[in-house]
Image: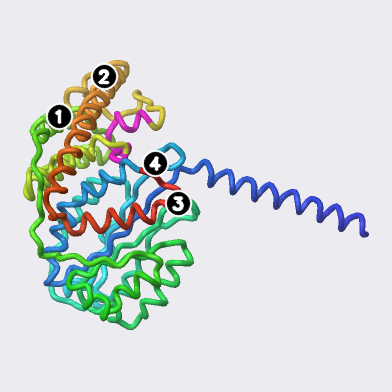
Amino acid sequence: MKTYILKALFIFTILITKIGYSTNSENKTKKQTTKVALLLDTSSSMSGLINQAKAQLWEIINELSHAKCNGETPKLEIALYEYGNDKLSSSEGYIRQALQFTSNLDDVSEHLFSLTTNGGSEFCGQVIQTSINELEWGGNNSDLKMIFIAGNEPFTQGKLNYKDAITNAKEKDITVNTIFCGDYNQGVSGMWQDGAVYGGGDYMTINHNKNIVHIVTPYDSNILILNKKLNKTYIHYGNSGHSKYSNQAKQDANAATLDEVVIVKRAISKSSKLYKNTEWDLVDASEEKEIDYNTLKKKQLPKNLQTKSSKEIKKYVDAKRKERIEIQGKIQELNKKRKQYVTKKQKESSNKNELESVMIKAIKKQARKKKYSW
């Protein structure tokens, strides 16, 4: 009997070892991901915050595009919530998930531009907990997981205690950062600093009504010309291909409504490794998987490809890939010169954009704990 028990224990030990090895191997081979959940107060006084988020999204993404971990650029996923708006359901705590975690940056821009403000009650603890419950945070221990919650009312509002919500966040290795829109000391008395300290994150304050400063550089016009050429390298396919392709142009137009420099920053993002559209663009898709060109539905392709053979379509995709790589390289080269110019101008002036500056600083600080480098 003892022999059977020993054998059973031996087999059990081997199985556990294999499972542990398999799990560790998966974590090592799985691409590292930066997960950022933006929880934005959309009550009536927060129009300035939303405008800053729209204008500075691309600069934040551009900074993240330079991050490296184990020699690779980590994947980026962004989720978006709005809270504190009377137009939202009271039974849900005036909270709405605008966007689940996605690496489709055009979708992030689209949903930011869809936000509108209205008076309401801001329940910080509840929106943090809702984002923890609803978002797919995953179980990869090497991922960088962050919540950025921004608002201007006391952090203590609502039935759910913010400390209970943040405790649950920490159990999932999620860092909670707080951005108070207003005076530093007012945010401290409103417990925004306490929320950040308890969440292992950073407490930040911004003037959400401050006018955004855009630095125009001698390189911007050439980047804009290249951006138009870059757009022509995209080849839509699939059920949602044409609508996603149209949305790309729409988000260029949305950026243009803010400032020409915002389109420049967006173009730089589009030239980075973080801007991928594998679900609707044949060039990006063909880099990640083998495409069976014989099975493509011709009616879902651009008109100039609908009468082409499978071989001709593949040849066209390959040509556009080469063209895109060349254009993106030129944008990145111009961006190096542009960054030097902007850095020099910023040193000459104490003017810095609010949301962009505080978020980039916090992200870089926390990313180093996950062995990111810039």
Give x and y (percent) for residue 192. 29, 74
Q: For numbered disc 1, what is the local secondary structure?
A: helix
Q: Is residue 1 left or right of residue 231?
A: right
Q: Secondary structure at mark 4?
A: loop
Q: Which residue is mark 1?
A: 226
* Badge nearest the viewer, 3 or 1: 3
Residue 341 image point, x, y percent: 15, 39
- Residue 146: say if magenta: no
- Which residue is more in the foreground, 104 or 218? 218
Q: Which mark is residue 68?
A: 4
Q: Looking at this view, is 273 or 316 the one in front?
A: 273
Q: Quadrant of residue 210?
A: bottom left
Q: Report the span colored magenta.
A: 274-287
Q: Tell me how far mark 1 sits from mark 2, CA to CA.
A: 17 Å
Label 4 to label 3, Cα distance in Å?
11 Å
Res 299 visible? no
- The front one of 198 and 157 is 198
Of badges 1 and 4, the one in the foreground is 4
- Whether pointer 3 and pointer 2 mark residues with C-beta atoms closer than 8 Å, the reply is no
Report the amino acid beneath label 3. Answer: Lys
Report the residue marked by disc 3: 370
In primary-sequence order, the first of circles 1 and 4 is 4
Tell me the quarter of the image containing the N terminus.
bottom right
Looking at the rendered structure, the kind of residue marked 1 is: Leu
| Cα distance between the residues tagged 3 and 2 | 38 Å
As helix, strand or loop, the secondary structure at mark 3 comes to helix
Q: Earlier in the sequence, mark 2 or mark 4?
A: 4
Amino acid beneath label 4 = Lys
